Amino acid sequence: MLRDKRILLIVGGGIAAFKCLDLIRRLRERGAAVRCVLTESAAKFVTPLSLQALSEDRVYGDMFSLTDESEMGHIQLSRQADLLVVAPATANLLARMAGGMADDLAATVLLATDKPVLAAPAMNVRMWLHPATQANVGLLGARGTMFVGPNAGAMACNEHGPGRMAEPLEIVAAIESIFAGKLTAGPPQARLAGPDTIELPGTRSEGALTHRPLAGRKALVTSGPTREAIDPVRYISNHSSGKQGHAIARALAALGADVTLVSGPVAVADPPGVRVVRVESADQMLAACRDASPVDIAVCAAAVADWKVANTADAKLKKAPGAKPPAIDLVPNPDILATLSAPGPDRPALVIGFAAETENVVANAIAKRARKGCDWILANDVSPATGTFGGDDNTVHLVTTEGAEAWPPQSKDAVARELARRVAARFA
Ligand code: C5P
């Protein structure tokens, strides 16, 4: 979708400027041409040389450079672009945009352009919530500027709340939505928060995006392990942390989906803006999934125990001197993924499963996709050496009817965002 699109990236001077390097890489790998304009302070956070190397184009910064003006004036810079992206859009840059200033090349290009503008704000939470910034953002939104983010979360300044720049893949998704005609102008929702309502961690939906391609879609995500009772105090379970499933629920919600997360016992926090149903056993998980159905999207990320105890004791099993240990009979648990994937009027349009493998990852996942009847499988290597179980990173392959695609090693959050982006593209 971005092939041959020309993006003029205006980099403001904030700590989030480092994310622009990844943004450029993501845009370039999707076939877009990227040209960068740096403010003077941006050059203190990222070097023109890195931007130049990644964009494979020269970087512009100085309005009064004769070469720039003769070879590429500010009018030309915007004329030759399909879209202007301001990232990070600092409080200062937003103020200069709102005030119609033309005091450096970045502001001048933004004032002179007749092309769509997408801004990714990034600043301290109090600066973002300040009425001056909110007024500027409101004004810019009313004039047609589109926004992605800011996200709520921990900030470099040790505060918490809205102000983090959207992640590169979220910005890419917003750019794709603009070219698909789906992202409309307007300020982000986070501006509605007043200065007295700075959120505590997890109290507000992350990714206050005007870009909500999954709005109106219902999603069901399973996450975490299940516990299969042996008796009232003992159970069989596994090491699943729930990090990947919870991240997927959060990423789908950030793109506007109405998400129900059915989770086994985990230590990770509930994702903001998501309906969470807590369960213990596989039977309870299946019942909760049935209650949440019908849905458009189902993602089964839970590590459901394969077996449950056939002869669960009603009272605590006692050890008696000299007695043999009790025999535990196991019977298979219901397969939730296969159940949700079964054809029928309520089958979700898209069912995604996971395949945790320790060898022949892709081949086993292809076979599993067919066996379970789901549409996509995210396959990952969980051999102990990879540290996937309980860790923050994941290396996955996406297996679809079209084949298998290896994704680069990345955080579980990044895997979740990329998956949500793919889901949004599938429903576009
Ligand atoms: O069969 P296996 O456990 O390898 O399959 C993994 C996939 O199936 C995961 O998506 C997991 O959430 C799902 N699953 C399930 N119910 C089960 C077993 C696995 O939903 N009983």
Image: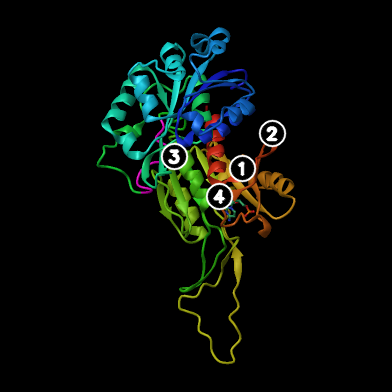
Looking at the image, tell me whether mark 2 or mark 3 is earlier in sequence order: 3
Q: Nearer the viewer, mark 2 or mark 1?
A: 2
Q: Residue furthest left?
A: 196
Residue that carries the numbered disc 3 in the rendered image: 253
Ligand 1 contact, mark 4 (Cβ < 8 Å) = yes
- Tell how many labels: 4
Q: Is residue 134 above or below residue 236?
A: above
**Residue bearing mark 4:** 301
Dominant SS of magenta comes to: loop
Which type of secondary structure does the marked residue at label 2 adopt? loop
Residue at left offset 46%, top offset 51%: 262
Q: Residues within 10 Å of mark 3 (few under 14, many from 20)?
A: many
Percent across and percent down for residue 224 are 52, 56
Q: Residue at x 43, y 18 (%)?
A: 104
Decide which of tag 2 and tag 1 comes sooner along the chain.
Answer: 1
- Gap between marks 2 and 1, in whole Å? 13 Å
Query: Disc 1 marks which residue?
Result: 374
Q: Using a 10 Å C-alpha cutoff, classify the residue at mark 2 as few (fewer than 14 neighbours), some (14 to 19) or many (20 or more).
A: few
Q: Which residue is mark 2?
A: 402
Q: Which quarter shows the N terminus?
A: top right
Placement of 29 over or under 271, stated as above or below = above
Q: Local crowd at mark 1 within 10 Å, few (<14), some, or many (≥20)?
A: many
Query: For the residue marked with disc 2, what is the amino acid?
Result: Glu
**Is 421 rendered above or below residue 382?**
above
Mark 1 CB near ligand 1 (8 Å cut): yes
